[in-house]
Amino acid sequence: MTEKTTAPLADFGAGDIASAGGKGAALGELVRQGFPVPPGFIITTGAYLSFLAETRVGAALEGLLRADPAGGPDIGTAEGESRGAAIRALFVGTEIPGQLRQEIAAAYAELGGGAVAVRSSATAEDLPGAAFAGQQDTYLNVLGEDAVVQAVADCWASLWTDRAVAYRQRQGIDPRGLAIAVVVQRMVPADTAGVMFTANPVTGERGEIVVDASPGLGEAVVAGRVTPEHYVLDRTGKALSFAPGGREVVITAAEGGGTQENPGAPGTGPELAADQLTELARLGQRAQQHFGRPQDIEWAVSGGFLYVLQSRPMTALPPQPRTLNPFQRRLGPFFMEMFQERPYPLDVSGWMSRGILAMLHRMAGSVGVVFPTVDHLLPEEDGVVVRLVPPIPHPTIRTLAAPVSLARRARQFNPAKWTQDPRFSAFLENVEQLNGKDPGPLRWRAVVALAEESFATMRGITDLRVSYLPGVFVPLLKMRLMLVLLGKAKLAAALIAGAETRTSQANRALEQLAAVAADDPGLARAFAESDPGRLLELVEKEPEHVAFREAFKAFLLEYGHRETISVVLSSAPTWSDAPEVVLGLVKAMFGERLQTVDQTGMALSELRRHPLLRFAPLRRSVLAAVGSARSGMAFREDSHFYATKVIPPMRRAYRELGHRLVLAGVVDDAHDVYHLRFEELASITDTDDGGALPASVRERFRPVVLARAAKRRELEGIPLLDPALLFGRNRRVKDALVTGTPASRGQASGPVRVIRGPAEFGQLRTGEVLVCPYTNPSWTPLFQRAAAVVVDTGGLGSHAAIVAREYGIPAVMGTGSGTSTLADGQRVLVDGTAGAVLSAPTSDGA
């Protein structure tokens, strides 16, 4: 061991994580910036690595790690926990070499000896997206050289506690490249201590500072041993709100070392004075400004002096709250329905930017409207989407000419004949060519080009939509105007439902699959008793189910390109990628179909009975407008259907790129390719000898993938858009469990079945009330069995509302909280006319 392994805090800065760990680097940076940090020193990661090299621990540790293919003890299994315990025992049972021990002792003596805090500082902690809060150990009020050396060894061992290993496994951090430093600081005998967040961790409000405090050492607060005093401050430190603490226990330094717990006593007032709150706010904002992001800070007050004990980036911080204008609230449900899952970087930079959103920009531009860019719609932090901002399209001077342009295109392009357009035939030919290309033998650049061809092919549908959509909206506007003049405006939604589409054809094909399964006694029994995963295994492997297997293959060949979650997410599987989803839909088809109301037929009959429609010319004009509007809605649905044909070849290209990144050690799973942006993938070049990727690709992109994956996990519990911003103003209905937008008329009662995603399709039973967070065309077969539909998102024009009206079942949209308020088996009455869900009597009248 030749290099020095201890140094004062001030010798380290933010760029020294590799030697000082996350905590040590941050503390050193604070010291350099003049923050009131207790003096101390760092025992570097070099000391830890020297310990491994100079003792039997290093070889033994390598052997234990090599024995685990995952790269660390698999916590959660007895074998993994035993291996973790064995690793910790290595550290505890091995004496620290003499020279290293002398350096630690010398640094401790130079600090002045006495009571110190010994704190772990791993290289993978206190980072954005991976706080590692409490995962490694801290030892307080350590007294004497021997105790300090022992505490250092214990900190090293804590790198391998079950909780730390499990946390790293969740974060995808490879333990083989991991090291740990140790921070030793003069102990602060705190009178009061706690934590401070420089942004509100619950609401995300950046203009608020949140402080938790309690008497004694801060361990009571960070370990959750007390209910702390809770302050919400403005940026000046002025208290906006205060909640007293429980003071259940007070942790203090014990006389002989370590800590002791004392019973708390009710306080007579807040622990912190106004000037202390002001100083805390000032220090917090300085730290945030210096580090460039909101901070989670531990602090202590001793003898009237305020100390900063730690500062790290806040994790899982919601975006800054925002208000929506009326236009955004109206448009928001449409976008929220599409973005039920957080898009990956490759979703945003690939299919969305170059496909779906490019189409929206073209369509808006055709009427002189500027549509916001993707970075306004989906702002990012650390390369990951943090929120959805409903767009505000901006008209330009060209918008004044839009009526003329729309009328011209509406006359020229009839949506009822769009499949006869030569551009449609060219689109299908391009899709067929894409599907005929195998990305496996191609060089990296050619595989990227295959994805680019998919984007270019999508432009064929974009061109058709630009041409034909005016033929949708103009007749629809004409029909609505006629209905208003006739006093029948309420019939509009029902009149345009029920058009023949590729989606309705898919639904009938699913019914035929269910009929084929019903004719196979063994398979029919399996559908009644098994989950979709088991059904897939039976269909694929059991030879006696050949009739269903062939019908199923034909179905997937025709409809397998459909999305399971959202058309904007190329990362989500298609029906062919997740055939168990289709089997779940077939499973839902079993049983008698409910008698439904033909809302379209009833609306048309009511319209025909209008006295003014006795006049043949007016009747022909009104019914022609209805027919044109229905054709237009069918075009909108079918052009969506055909656009998704581009997704499978694009996903095949991405899957091939992901596979090659796995071989290069950049990612652990091919799906992790979605953590990279399309332009990043396009920047990679393979070598000339067999197409392998150079080592520099791993060095460049693996840290990027891990950081974005950690950030994505950090945001898991935070919605892209708070439903309360869209649906918080729902009208109140007396005794309603939830309310929303009335979307399909009528009333129906039944037990609730909450279906949160395609994997749960098979759980719906005939006559149940379908309660779900969103829908897309994949969900439509469920409507044939549901008594009613209740959806968290969406409005009158959303997919679920249209299909509910087509099937004649009540629907309530945009409840905002249906899936969290209602529970499986709960009997409810859905009033689709009033937009409310109420409790219903049980079958026994209770």
Image (cartoon, rainbow, N blue to C red):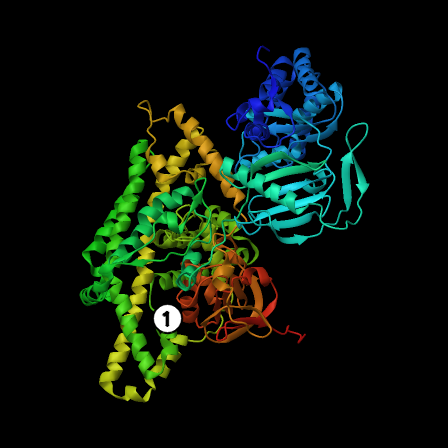
Q: Residues within 10 Å of mark 1 (few under 14, many from 20)?
A: many
Nearer to the camera, 672 or 24: 24
> Is residue 824 left or right of 778 when viewed as pictured?
right
Q: Where is residue 695 in the image (x, y as percent from the top left)?
A: 40, 24
Q: Residue 423: in sight, yes or no? A: yes
How many numbered discs sit on the rendered protein? 1
Please tell me in which quadrant of the rendered image residue 437 appears. Answer: top left
Nearer to the camera, 76 or 334: 334
Amino acid type of the residue tagged 1 in the rendering: Ala
Q: Residue 59: in sight, yes or no? A: no
Residue at the spot 22% in from the left edge and 66% down from the top edge: 403
Q: Which residue lies furthest to the front in this view?
A: 275
Nearer to the camera, 302 or 497: 302
Q: In which quarter of the image is the N terminus?
A: top right
Q: Position of residue 589 (x, y in %)?
A: 48, 62
Seen in the picture, residue 113 relative to 671 is either above or below; the reply is: above
Please tell me in which quadrant of the rendered image residue 414 appears. Answer: bottom left
Q: Where is residue 401 in the image (x, y as percent from the top left)?
A: 21, 63
Seen in the picture, residue 268 relative to 109 is either above or below; the reply is: below
Q: Where is residue 450 in the image (x, y as percent from the top left)?
A: 29, 40
Nearer to the camera, 440 or 118: 118
Q: In which quarter of the image is the C terminus?
A: bottom right
Residue at the spot 54% in from the left edge and 46% down from the top edge: 317
> Is residue 408 left or right of 126 when viewed as pictured?
left
Q: Is mark 1 on a helix, strand or loop?
A: loop
Seen in the picture, residue 455 relative to 730 is either above or below; the reply is: above
Q: Mark 1 points at which residue?
A: 497
